[in-house]
Every structure is written in C-alpha cells, then in structure tokens.
Image (cartoon, rainbow, N blue to C red):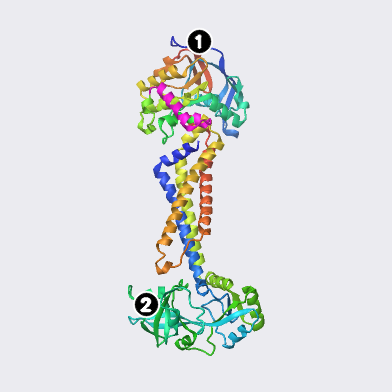
C-alpha cells in the first residue's frame, strides 16, 4: 500500500450473498457463488483473477448493469437492485463513472466532447458540458488534445479521455475494466498513477478489474477471485 | 443527446452519404416515376382539356374516349340544341388520316374538325397565325409538337403544303396543346374541310360539344340531354376521367410504373436498412457504453430517431429536388411537354420515405435496445 493513501472509511459498497447464474434449465452455469464483500471509500481496490474467475461479472453487478440471480448490492446506502429500471439508470448516471478496456469513446466526437458525454446525458447544455470536459482533460494534462478525435490520439491519451469522461460528473464510484490492458507498461503505469491522483478521494471508491501484475503495487486492497469466489482479501497480492 | 447522435452519424461520412444516397435515390425514383405516370395517363384527357369552351360532351352511347368513337348522325346536333338548358351546341369530328411529310415520309395524324361558324373547339393558345386564317381554302392549323416532328428545326411550317389523305392542305397556324397519349400530330380544320380530308361512312360527326346555360350545372344539362336524345352526355371532367380510366384499364402502364415505384421503395429500404444496420453495428459498443453510463432507452430511441430523421429529411430533399429538376429540365422536350409535379406526389413520397426510415430505424434500434450495458465489459 502506498504511504499517501487515505485511510479507509465506511463501507461504501456491500455485497450480500451474491449469486449469478447464466443460462436456463440443464444449461445453468453458476458464475458467482454467494459472494459477501465490503468495499470502502477512499481505497483503490483491485479485483484480480484469471479469465473466467467471475471478476467481470462481479464488477458488472457492482456497477448496476447486471442483475444478480440472488443477493443484494448496497452502494452508498442504496440497495441498487431494488430500484426501478429507470431509477437504476439514473443512479448509474449520478453515481458511477465507467472506464472501459477499449475506451469506447465515440469516434466522431472530439476528446472534450467525449469527456462531456455524462454531463450531456444528465441534461447539461452542450457548451457548458464541453467546457467542463475541457477542464477535466486539463486536470489529466491533455488539454492540448481537447479538439482532437480519438483516432488522432495515442492509446494512453485515449484512456485519459476515458478517465476524464468517467470523472467529469464527479461520481462517488469509479469502476474500471482492465484500464491498462491495451497500453504498454509505461503508459499503463502512468494511467494508474493518474487514477490514484485524480480519481481517488475520501468520498470516492475506485474499483479496478485487472490482471496486470505490473501495477499491483499501486493497490490499496486486492480481492482475488477464483471460480466465482473471493479467495484472497488483502493489501498485497499473494502468489499469482 | 441529439447533437451527439447527429455527430455520430455525420462523422462517419461513408455511411452517412450511403444513407443519403439510399433515401435520395428512392425519393427520386418514386417522385419521378409517379409524376411521369400521372402526366402520362392525364394525356388520355388532353383532347378534352384542349377544348375548354365546352363543358358537356355528347356522343354515341358506345363511345368511350376522344379516340374510341362511334360517329353520330348529323341530326344529333339539332336534337342536342333543342334540349332545354343547352346554351349552344356545335359539331366536332375527330378522325385519323395520313400525311405526306416534306421529306416524303408517311405520318399518321389526327384531324379535328371544328365548327365552321364559331371555330369552337380550336385551342385557345395560337402560337402563329390568326383564327381567321382557318377560313382560307384547305387551311389547317398544326400543333406545336407535330410541327417539330414534321418539319426540320428552325423552319416555319406556315404556308407549307401537305398531302393530307391525298388532298391538299395548307398550314396557316400553329396551336399550343398538350400532346395526346399517343403523341399523334394533330391538324385542326373547319368541320366542312375535315369532311373532305377524311372521307368515310354516312355518319361522320364524332361529338356534339355543348355548353350549359346560365343557372344550370353541366351535370344537369348532361342528364337532360341523355334523357331527351338517348345519347351519352358527359360533363367535361367526367369525360376527361373516362379518357384517363381507359388508359389505366387497357394498358400495362399502371402495373409497370407500380413495379418501378415498388422497386424504388424496396431498393431504398435495402440500401438504407443495410447501411443503417452497419452504422449501428459499428457503433454498438458506443451505444452500450452510453447505456452503461446512464443514458436511458428513451434517450437512445430519440438518438436513433434523430439520426433517421436527419437522413430522411436531407435524402428526401435531394431526391425530390432532383426529380423536380428532371421534370422541369425536360419541359421543353415534346415527350414531357405540359408535365408538372402535383403537390400530392412529393407528399406521397414523404410518406413513403417516412415509412422507410421508420422501418429501417426500428430495425436498427432493436439491436441497440437489445444490447445489454454489461456487454461493454465483455
């Protein structure tokens, strides 16, 4: 754990007996086997595991985009799967920032416009939203790339735009799916440093799905998953 | 989110122009073909519309159109004149003849014999010559399109002598009429001249043209004429419609144009549907990301609707504009003389384009709505 990391506070996210099954009838496959976990604010939490271990399913459930078969997910005091579909969508818009492995930027929008998307989705006027998108890019040191299209940016720059998009509306939870997978070691390290510097705050929780062992040392907490269960919960990575 | 939707679409220029082309091509084809169809079948009524003075046409009961005629006995004229409510009635003869062209070729023509005394039946627009010139011996007036067909460009046919059914005819005027369905060259002459130009059977009079007296509608007068004479009497509009219906019922034109219009729609749906699906497929990850971020399905629907609407409006505009330019660009050509684009056709095309974009937009939207936001993590 790095020395500058804020101290963990209250549990921001609670998972109770989360079960997730795919398929139907004889073809049912259980991916998560009754997971209980708590994730605190102010921590950079890594979700680590081999392919097929269930980490993507788990982060999808935490992010409110995949209904669990059983169990409840409490995010900042809200049982998110008791919300109506529309309320859950609004909850995601207000509360969660997403960073995807492949960035998923809109190729025909500039970096500043891409960064502004959550604000526009929330109903903010275009000019104001884009201005705030530019401010966010500035914080991530790519203000000079604000008017470029994603294809004109390097992988690392695109991921910074994606981080800007995830943070522009100041969400309390940031979920990242393999944010360094498409980057070289140097760029990946820089992106993780940025996430620590910019995303992490006392009132914010950052969960990162990764199997990039080059950046394990930046985690405050590491949850290791195997076969749909959490097999390790600690500040350092066990043998992996 | 609308501007984001529009930027997503217009930023992918290849697909955007593909979509525009699909809609524009379809709108062009539908508008142009429907316009040509409508104007073509309306030519079945041009002989009626070229004679605006008469509002009642009287004929033998078996006569169907101005070109499918069983002649009347000459006594029919007096019978019609004697019907109460008839202001005036004049004879008209319509017949076919052959004319030797100045180059020596043979051309089938139409001869219209009009009332000697009043010249009722002569088209109102005379391009060259005067009405009185028709009283000169062997005088005929030729229609403008016919003059262009029989005589070399740049030469005036006025004063030219022709052999009309082996009789001398002298062209002394040019009239402006819309061509008939068969685009036959038409000669107008006095009724007495026409009898000489076109020898035939005992009965020679094709129609009695009548006008309803003041205070009577053409329909009332037509009914009275039929009751009093046993002849068939049609108002101008009815008889014009008879000519149009004859073409619809007796030619393959409606089917052929209908097929072309249907093809325009199908090709449009195919191009637009395929391109739109490709566009959505290419952007499905982005749509998934938007859904994950917190964009509702309703906003996604609005985004796709905005994209479809933009393509529909711009494509429709280009297509209809091209069709209108085509029609008016060829208005001086004999084949398209008198053609116009009635407002109903662009409106109908708009409805077809709307159906097209609703259909293709709905198909594209289905795949977006089916996309689970969780798929962006896979």
Question: Most extreme residue toward the bottom, as rendered?
Answer: B202
Q: Is label 1 in contact with label 2 (beta carbons under 8 Å)?
A: no
- Tell me what residue is drawn at x 47 percent, y 17 percent: A200
- Residue at image mark 1: A7
Q: Residue at x 43, y 24 (%)?
A: A135
Relative depth, front residue between B356 and B280 = B356
In x, y percent, where is residue A65? Answer: 54, 29
| Residue B63, x across and y down, in percent | 57, 79
Is the magenta region chiefly helix, strand or loop? helix
Residue under numbered circle 2: B150
Q: Residues within 10 Å of mark 1 (few under 14, many from 20)?
A: few
Can residue B13 be seen here? The reply is yes
Above/below status of A8 relative to B7: above
Residue nearest the observer in this picture, A52 or B256: B256
Which residues make up the magenta segment?
A118-141
Looking at this view, is B368 or B20 the one in front?
A: B20
Q: Mark 2 falls on what kind of element?
A: helix
Q: Chain of mark 1?
A: A
Same subunit: marks 1 and 2: no
- Given the image, what chain letter belongs to the residue carrying mark 2? B
Q: Residue at x 49, y 45 (%)?
A: B308
* Label 2 crowd bin: few (<14), some (14–19), many (20+), radius 10 Å: some
- Determine if residue B273 is in view: no
């Amino acid at each position: 754990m790095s020395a500058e990391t804020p101290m963990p506070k209250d549990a921001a996210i609670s998972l109770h007996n989360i079960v997730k099954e795919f398929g139907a009838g004889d073809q049912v496959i259980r991916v998560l086997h009754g997971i209980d976990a708590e994730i605190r604010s102010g921590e950079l939490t890594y979700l680590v595991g081999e392919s097929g271990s269930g980490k993507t399913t788990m982060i999808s459930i935490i992010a409110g985009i995949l209904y669990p078969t059983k169990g409840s997910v409490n995010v900042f005091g809200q049982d998110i799967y008791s919300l109506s579909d529309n309320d859950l969508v609004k909850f995601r818009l207000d509360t969660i920032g997403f960073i995807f492995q492949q960035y998923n930027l809109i190729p025909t929008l500039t970096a500043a416009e891409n960064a502004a998307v959550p604000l526009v989705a929330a109903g903010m006027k275009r000019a104001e939203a884009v201005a705030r998108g530019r401010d966010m890019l500035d914080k991530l040191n790519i203000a000079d790339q604000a008017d470029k299209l994603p294809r004109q940016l390097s992988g690392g720059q695109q991921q910074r735009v994606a981080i800007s998009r995830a943070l522009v509306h100041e969400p309390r939870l940031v979920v990242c799916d393999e944010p360094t997978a498409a980057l070289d070691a140097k760029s990946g390290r820089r992106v993780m440093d940025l996430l620590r510097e910019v995303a992490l705050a006392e009132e914010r929780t950052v969960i990162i799905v990764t199997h990039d062992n080059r950046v394990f040392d930046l985690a405050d907490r590491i949850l290791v998953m195997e076969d749909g269960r959490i097999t390790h919960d600690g500040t350092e990575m066990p043998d992996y | 989110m609308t501007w984001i939707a529009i930027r997503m679409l217009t930023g992918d220029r290849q697909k955007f122009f593909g979509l525009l082309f699909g809609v524009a091509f379809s709108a062009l084809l539908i508008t142009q073909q429907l316009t040509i169809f409508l104007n073509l079948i309306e030519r079945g009524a041009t002989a009626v519309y070229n004679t605006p003075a008469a509002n009642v046409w009287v004929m033998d009961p078996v006569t169907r159109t101005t070109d499918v005629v069983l002649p009347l006995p000459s006594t029919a004229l007096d019978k019609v004149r004697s019907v109460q409510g008839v202001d005036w009635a004049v004879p008209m003869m319509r017949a076919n003849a052959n004319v030797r062209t100045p180059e020596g070729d043979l051309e089938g023509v139409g001869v219209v014999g009009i009332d000697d005394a009043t010249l009722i039946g002569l088209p109102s627009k005379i391009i060259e010559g005067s009405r009185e010139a028709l009283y000169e011996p062997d005088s005929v007036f030729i229609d403008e399109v016919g003059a262009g067909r029989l005589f070399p460009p740049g030469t005036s046919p006025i004063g030219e002598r022709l052999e009309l059914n082996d009789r001398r005819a002298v062209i002394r005027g040019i009239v402006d009429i819309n061509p008939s369905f068969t685009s036959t060259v038409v000669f107008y002459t006095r009724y007495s001249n026409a009898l000489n130009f076109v020898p035939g059977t005992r009965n020679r009079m094709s129609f009695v043209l009548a006008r309803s007296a003041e205070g009577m509608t053409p329909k009332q007068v037509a009914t009275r004429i039929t009751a009093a004479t046993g002849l068939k009497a049609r108002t101008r509009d009815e008889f014009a419609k008879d000519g149009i219906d004859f073409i619809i019922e007796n030619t393959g034109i409606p089917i052929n144009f209908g097929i072309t219009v249907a093809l325009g729609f199908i090709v449009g749906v195919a191009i637009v549907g395929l391109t739109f699906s490709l566009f959505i497929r290419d952007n499905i990850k982005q749509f998934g990301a938007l859904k994950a971020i917190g964009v509702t399905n309703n906003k996604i629907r609005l985004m796709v609707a905005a994209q479809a609407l933009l393509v529909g409006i711009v494509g429709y505009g280009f297509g209809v504009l091209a069709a209108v330019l085509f029609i008016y660009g060829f208005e001086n050509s004999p084949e398209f003389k008198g053609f116009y684009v009635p407002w109903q056709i662009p409106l109908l095309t708009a409805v077809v384009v709307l159906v097209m974009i609703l259909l293709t937009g709905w198909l594209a939207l289905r795949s977006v709505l089916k996309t689970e936001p969780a798929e962006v993590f896979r």
